[in-house]
Amino acid sequence: MVAFVPIYDNGEEYEDHETELGEKIYIEEKSAVDSIKDKGFIIEETYPSHLDTNIKKYKGVRYYKEPIESVTLRSVSGKILDSREYMYIYEMVIEEK
């Protein structure tokens, strides 16, 4: 059986980084998505995106409140530094004994 856990990430790096597990675990993915969207995270972006070229293991969807165009931070090389807060869904396998 699989359960779906919404996870919040504040999008910050290093010492300011925070993540939080959702308060509920869902048995239907749609219910988990609905709970995320109810919190205002309505913009879906496939991950890894063009911003995350060095990440190959995880593929999925992140949910944001604001579009990538709102990000104004750039590195010295000109790469966009995405510090938007987001949520995503972790699929947790539950074993029955």
Image (cartoon, rainbow, N blue to C red):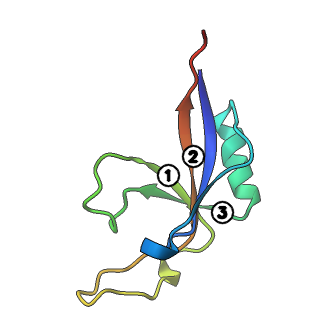
On screen, residue 93 above or below 19 = above
If the image is split into quadrants, where does the C terminus sit?
A: top right
Residue 16, compared with residue 22, is above or below; it is below
Disc 1 residue type (three-letter): Val
Quarter the N terminus occupies = top right
Q: Secondary structure at mark 3?
A: loop
- Where is residue 28 shown, x and y percent of the image? 68, 32
Residue 53 lies in quadrant: bottom left
Label drawn at residue 89: 2
Q: Position of residue 93 (x, y in %)?
A: 54, 27
Q: CA distance from mark 2 to mark 3?
A: 12 Å
Residue ID for mark 1: 61
Distance from Cα at disc 2 to Cα at disc 1: 8 Å
Q: Measuring 59% from the left and 74% from the top, which residue is drawn there?
A: 66
Name the amino acid type tagged 3: Phe
- Looking at numbered disc 2 in the image, what kind of residue is underneath it? Ile
Compare marks 2 and 3 and give the one earlier in the sequence: 3
Check contact, mark 2 vs mark 1: CB within 8 A.
yes
Left or right placement of residue 29 versus residue 80 in this view:
right
- Kindly tell me whether residue 13 is visible in this rendering: no
* x and y percentages locating residue 75 in the rendered image: 31, 86
Secondary structure found at label 1: strand
Q: Which sits in the foreground, 21 or 85?
A: 21
Dot placed on the residue nearer the N-terminal end, 3 or 1? 3
Asked which secondary structure carries label 2, the reply is strand
Above or below — where is 37 with respect to 90?
below
Q: Is residue 77 left or right of 41 when viewed as pictured?
A: left
Cα–Cα span, label 3 and label 1 = 12 Å
Percent of width and height locating residue 13: 44, 73
Q: Nearer the viewer, mark 2 or mark 3?
A: 2
* Cβ atoms at labels 3 and 1 below 8 Å apart: no
Look at mark 3 in the image and give the residue it sits on. 41
